[in-house]
Structures are given as C-alpha cells and as structure tokens.
Amino acid sequence: MERQLIGRGILAGALAGVLAFIWAKLLIEPVIGRAIDFENGVGAAHEAAEHTHGAGGHSHGGEGAEVFTRGVQSNIGMGFGVLIFSVAMGALLAVVFCVAYGRINVSARALAALTAGGMLVSLWIVPALKYPPNPPAVSLDETIKQRTLLYVLLVVLSAALFVGSILLTRRLTPKLGVWNASLVGIADYVVSMAVVFLILPGIHETPSAFPGDDLYEFRLYSLGTQVVIWVTIGLVFGALASKVLGEKKQSVSA
C-alpha cells in the first residue's frame, strides 16, 4: 500500500508541477526578464564608465556569453526544474502521510491537506521570511554558495523544529487538551524559529536601485507558485489516497 500511495504522491506532484509552471511562465517570467534587463543595463553603464576613464582597453563581449538561450531557460529549464521539484515534494508528502496515517485521528483527505499546509509553512514560507527569494541576476555570484548553504540549513532546521513542535503537542494533549496543547506547540515553533533567525546571518545584496515593484511581484508570485504546488498536491493526493485506502479496507472486509 505504501508504494501505491507514494505513486499517487508522484502523480499529484507531476500535476502540481504543470500548473505551477503555467503560473510561473505567465507571472514570474516577465519579472525575471526585467531583472536581467536591469543587470545588463548596470553592466553596460559600468563598462561605459570604465571606457570613459580609460580603464578598459579591451572588449569583454565573450565573457558573458550564455550557455543556454533565454528561450531555453524560460521554457525547458524552468519547466523541468518546477516539475522535478513538485514531483519530489509529492513523493515526500506521501512518505510523511504514510508515517502519520493511523497515528492521527483524521480522514485521509484531511491528513493530506494538513500535511501539505504544514510542509508549505515549514519548508517555504518560514524560511522565506529570513531569506526571501530574489530574481536571477540581482544577487552577487560570489555569495551563491553561502546563500545556498544558509538557506538549506534554515529549511532543515525549520522542518525539524516543526516536527518537534507537533510531537510536543501530541505529548501534551492528554494533559492540556487539544486547544491548549496546540497553542503550546505553535508557541514552541515560533520561539524556536525566532532564535534561529537571530543566530543565522542576514544577506542583503539586492541593489538599492532595483525597482521595488519588480522585487515585490517576484516574491509574491514565488509564494503563489508554492501555494499552487502544495494546494494541488494536498487536494489531489488526498483524493487519490482516500480511494486507495478505501479500496484496501473493502478488500480486507471482503
């Protein structure tokens, strides 16, 4: 049954990837294009200033050549990346669902929705509060390794602390009741993440001249992409898992 559920998670993730790609193509891609135009404009201005002051006596035209064209990056590259991410998240949600099912007294659809919501919050929304996404060509290339490591570390810590808060809530429920135990669990996660936010260094690289509207739209639409992915996975997987588990119960009773 676990293999069937994971297969359904992969299927839900694939559908979510298609919908998220359409969302990103329509809303995020134009912002990325403007960000690249901004970078090219800044680079051209710096090069013109160097030539004006006699600092540059040779051409840099070959150094910035793209390995893949913008068309390939914005279609095949973006589509493949979003699809792989969504499929992986669908499989991960299915694994978490298999671990939690039977231990939490809710239906399969409700558990899938709760799991998807929790993963959206812990794996993306909370980490994005500390390290919000920036359009390509805006951040410094020299710090990409540092930014990636810090972001991955924050995601891992957020997921671990989120699971720890859930376990704490379950342990306190018999003593405090569901409502009070849930409040304690939420407070535990919020305080723990606040401490993590204070410990981890901040990264502030976005140029002050970069259009604020474009930055706002990119971050808002990036959040929208994640919402599309997780809502789709939660709803589709919940429906598929409910059917699988219902068929299983029927076969056992028969």
Image: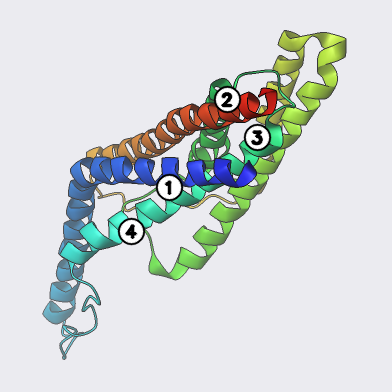
Labels 3, 4: front one: 4
Q: Is residue 118 above or below residue 28?
A: above
Image-based side of 151 in relation to 52, left or right: right
The residue shown at (66%, 24%) is 254
For disc 3, the marked residue is 194
The residue that disc 4 covers is 80
Looking at the rendered structure, the kind of residue marked 1 is: Ser
- The x and y percentages for residue 59 are 15, 87
**Residue 138 can be seen, yes or no:** no
In the figure, 184 relative to 68: above or below? above
- Give the label, 2 or 3, closer to the camera: 2
Circles 2 and 3: CB atoms closer than 8 Å = no
Q: Secondary structure at mark 2?
A: helix
Query: Would residue 173 appear left or right of 157 to someone viewing this image?
Result: right
Q: Secondary structure at mark 4?
A: helix
CA separation in Å, label 3 and label 1: 28 Å
Name the foreground residue: 59 vs 148: 148
